[in-house]
Image: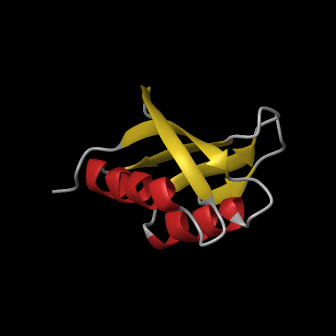
Amino acid sequence: MTAPSETWRLFAHGHVQGVGYRAACEAQATSLQLGGWVRNRTDGSVEVVATGSRNQLEALRQWMEQGPPAARVSKVEQETLPPEVFHGFSFRETR
């Protein structure tokens, strides 16, 4: 039996742009077999929408709280969205 899918929106705040955060996040999400996307936001944060099991999503959130070595994450905000289906994990335009 497969665990039910959830969709979360996560915002990473701090020094998270210009440090390879999006690329590393995409690699982490892909390794966790999550669907969704990542993008920079004009306020300096990074936004992620991801779909997977609660365990997969919690693993991504834990990673996001640290990020890649050059990142300095001050906080990660999380909200639950209605379940969505994504085919793979991708980058989106800054918004």
Q: Residue at coordinates 59% horizontally, 44% vertically from top-left?
A: 48
| Residue 13 sits in quarter | top right
**In the image, is 43 to the left or to the right of 71?**
right
Residue 63 shows in the view: yes
Residue 82 place in picture, x, y as percent: 44, 26
Locate the N terminus and report the quarter of the image it occupies: bottom left
79, above or below 69, in the image: above
Foreground pick, 90 / 9: 9
Residue 34 shows in the view: no
Q: Residue at coordinates 60% horizontally, 72% vertically from top-left?
A: 69
11, above or below 68, in the image: above
Foreground pick, 73 / 24: 73
Residue 84 place in picture, x, y as percent: 50, 37
| Residue 40 sits in quarter | top right
Q: Which residue lies furthest to the left in this view?
A: 1
Query: Disc count in the image?
Result: 0
The type of colouring in the image is secondary structure
Q: Residue at coordinates 46% horizontally, 53% vertically from top-left?
A: 65
68, above or below 5, in the image: below
**In the image, is 94 to the left or to the right of 74?**
right
Residue 19 place in picture, x, y as percent: 74, 64
Residue 24 place in picture, x, y as percent: 63, 69
Q: Residue at coordinates 35% horizontally, 59% vertically from top-left?
A: 59
Locate the C terminus and report the quarter of the image it occupies: top right
